[in-house]
Image: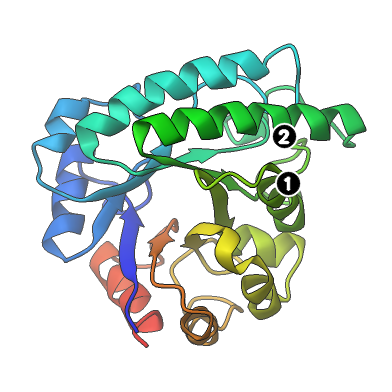
Amino acid sequence: MSFQLAVCAEMVFRDLPIVERVNRIHDLGFAAEIWSWHDKDVDALAATGATFTSMTGYLHGDLVDPATAGEVVRTAELSIEAAEKLGVTRLNLHTAELVDGRAARPRQRATGEMWLTALRTLERIGELGARAGVTFCVENLNTVVDHPGVPLARAKDTLALVEGVGHPNVKMMLDLYHAQIGEGNLVELVRRCGPAIGEIQVADVPGRCEPGTGEINYPAIARALAAIGFTGTIGMEAWNSADSATALAAFRAAFTV
């Protein structure tokens, strides 16, 4: 069983410009991921020849807010245009817009209107994805350490949204770092999410560094993913605890099944 392994270029080789980071990741045999695209030279990134698996799928707006959900859809269309240049097939969404990691419009509880708005907005985005041949993935977040004020952030919430929409171009970006902080029970979570998973993202807890630096048994997670037949992308969205090349080697070792 093998997975496609990707590395977030925003978080490793940080002494290098972003294009050189992507080149290093590519040279080491990994696919690359980026967060934002609007502040980067997309043509220069495309010229690296690297495989890009994921990037942000919107710029502004909240999936849960009738007043700003239209902005999510509008900027999703712009993200699709950038994705075409890079060959990206998965575009990442959050339930709320983030500014420096925090919710732009913090909410401490979810309402029925938020659920319905998110579902209706994801239906629209799913149709965008179907026309463009890309999948939008809703990422779960933790609100304890990194992303306070984000509603419907837990993995069980993003799973409910994805299953509620029931669109083949809307999946989960199942982030196991965030899930460990907010929910735990990761092996059972992987089994439960199963077909709803578009991609897995990983980092260890605490510290958000590469697998093997914290409490998560990632080799066990890898075996659980193999057991459910997952053969998709696993992205390391983690800081490196020492040098970046060593961190990437540890990531590969954890997910070699």
> Could you say which disc has been placed on residue 69 in the image?
none
Residue type, mark 2 in image: Leu
Where's residue 78, x and y in %?
39, 19
Where's residue 83, x and y in %?
30, 32
Q: Which residue is mark 1?
A: 164
Are the residues flagged by discs 1 and 2 in contact, CB closer than 8 Å? Answer: yes
Q: Is residue 76 above or below residue 55?
A: above
| Quarter residue 165 falls in | top right
Quadrant occupied by the C terminus: bottom left
Where's residue 178, x and y in %?
64, 58
Q: Residue at x 62, y 72 (%)?
A: 190
Q: Which residue is mark 2?
A: 119
Where's residue 219, x and y in %?
48, 86
Quadrant occupied by the N terminus: bottom left
Residue 58 in view in this figure: yes
- In the picture provided, is 128 more to the left or to the right than 117? left
Query: Gap in Å between the C-alphas at discs 1 and 2?
Result: 7 Å
23 vs 186, nearest the viewer: 186
Q: Residue at x 55, y 50 (%)?
A: 171
Residue 57 in view in this figure: no
Q: Residue at x 39, y 79 (%)?
A: 255
Q: Residue at x 77, y 35 (%)?
A: 149
Residue type, mark 1 in image: Gly
Nearest to N terminus: mark 1 or mark 2:
2
Crowding around mark 1 (Cα neighbors within 10 Å: few <14, some 14 to 19, many 20+) is some
Secondary structure type for disc 2: helix
Name the colour scheme.
rainbow
Crowding around mark 2 (Cα neighbors within 10 Å: few <14, some 14 to 19, many 20+) is many
